[in-house]
Amino acid sequence: SRGIGAAISKALKAAGYSVAANYAGNDEVAAKFKAETGIPVYKWDVSNYDACAAGLAQIEKDLGPIDVIVNNAGLNVRADFRHLTDAEWVRIREVNLDGVVRVARDGFELLRASKRGSLVNVSSIMAHRGLRQLAGYSATKGAVTALTKALAVEYARLWTARSASSRIILPSCRRLRGVRGMAAVARKIEDAGASGTGGGAHFLGVTRSARGFAWRERLD
């Protein structure tokens, strides 16, 4: 209900989708987002298995068949790697990786049932380029990238049959500050959801050019 997640939700609604937004704990921000956009919000922690299954089931009950799932939840604890505690590492992993696994796994059959489903996992350029005090975040986002590529290979026949598709978004946190950068990510996710095709993992990298933002893409 904020940041890239809010931009994604607004873009998909503008494209004609019935959108549901998940949030973890900030009731005030979520309520404001709902009031401003008319998008229903659902509160649960993606690191909680039972909550994920129940949340997806409730959304399907309220809004109907699910065509697109965007895994955007992310958590970072900036710390020197030597001082990263076990509790901090576990919490980063639970949200950034375990949450993606749970939502993707629980939502997979829902996407297949829609006949044109798209699973979009938001990774990070940090999965490929390290940064000081972001070892935990980078490691988990790298795992998200690897997971999505593995899913694309494992279910290639299903992707080709247009019953689902698997995509990765790799935004750069430095270059996506502000509305302009977040809107660029949202448009790409909207495109991925609308097409519902493709037999592999879609890599999207954003770079700054003389004319603003430019996308580099390739399909593995």
Image: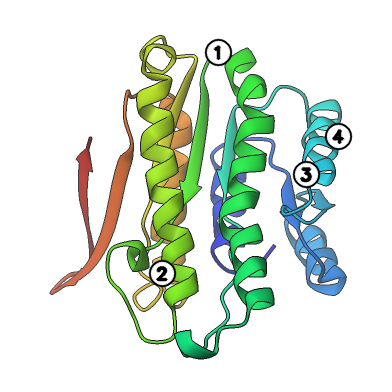
Q: Report which residue position mark 1 lands on.
A: 115
Quadrant in the rendering for residue 16: top right
Q: Report which residue position mark 2 lands on.
A: 180
Residue depth check, mark 3 versus mark 4: number of the one nearer the observer: 3
Q: Position of residue 122 (x, y in %)?
A: 47, 53
Measure the C-alpha gap from mark 4 to mark 2: 32 Å
Residue depth check, mark 2 versus mark 1: number of the one nearer the observer: 1
Residue depth check, mark 4 versus mark 2: number of the one nearer the observer: 4
Q: Earlier in the sequence, mark 1 or mark 4?
A: 4
Which image quarter is the C terminus in? top left
Q: Position of residue 124 (x, y in %)?
A: 40, 62
Position of 28 compared to 153: left or right? right
Residue type pointed to by label 1: Lys
At x 86%, y 34%, the residue is 58
Q: Position of residue 132 (x, y in %)?
A: 37, 86
At x 36%, y 37%, the residue is 149
Position of 219 compared to 115: left or right? left
At x 82%, y 61%, the residue is 35
Question: How was the colour assigned to the protein in this rendering?
Answer: rainbow
Badge 3 element: helix
Measure the C-alpha gap from mark 3 to mark 4: 14 Å
At x 48%, y 61%, the residue is 140
Task: Please tell me whether residue 150 is drawn above or below residue 25 in the rendered image.
Answer: above
Residue 49's disc is 3
Q: Given contact means CB atoms under 8 Å apart, are the residues at marks 3 and 2 in contact? A: no
Quadrant in the rendering for residue 159: top left
Measure the C-alpha gap from mark 1 to mark 4: 20 Å
Q: Report which residue position mark 4 lands on.
A: 58
Which image quarter is the N terminus in? bottom right
